[in-house]
Image: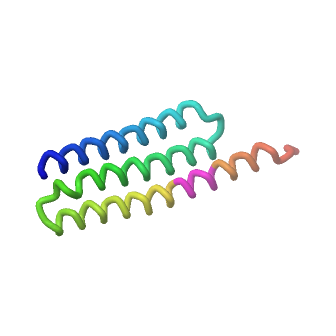
Amino acid sequence: MSVIVTATTILLLLIGVAFFLAGSMGLLRFPDVHARLHALTKADNLGLGFITLALLPQAADVWIASKLVMIWLLTMLAAATVSQLIARSALHEEDVKQEPGP
């Protein structure tokens, strides 16, 4: 049973790392702020979710497992909030650039 749990942990960790790498590639390759934010928030949330799933069977007890899930949920909330603020700031910058000067 321990070998199966370890193999599942390694597989889920590798999937999570793959999502993180995909999000990083999107950050580097996409042309504008909104596309970059989309790549980062989606891929990083999935990556952290898979890493959290990988760590859950390795947790010593339910308290530690619940802490891992809470960290993942709080990170998703923070990422959504920060990406919303960055997108609004980018839209504001685009509006300022398009306004005709005196």
Q: Does the magenta run of residues contain 82?
A: no
Query: Where's residue 10, x and y in %?
Result: 25, 42
- Of the pair 91 and 36, the residue shown nearer to us: 36
Query: Where's residue 43, x and y in %?
Result: 47, 46
Image height check: is 78 above or below 38? below
Query: Where's residue 86, x and y in %?
Result: 57, 51
> For the point 18% across and 46% down, which residue is it?
6
Residue extent of the magenta highlight = 83-89
Image height check: is 34 above or below 26? below
Residue 79 located left or right of residue 48: right
Magenta segment's dominant SS is: helix
Residue 64 located left or right of residue 41: left
Query: Where's residue 35, x and y in %?
Result: 62, 43
> For the point 61% across and 35% down, which residue is it?
30
> For the point 36% across and 39% down, which residue is it?
17
Q: Where, by quadrant of the figure, is residue 33 drawn?
A: top right
Residue 22 located left or right of residue 51: right
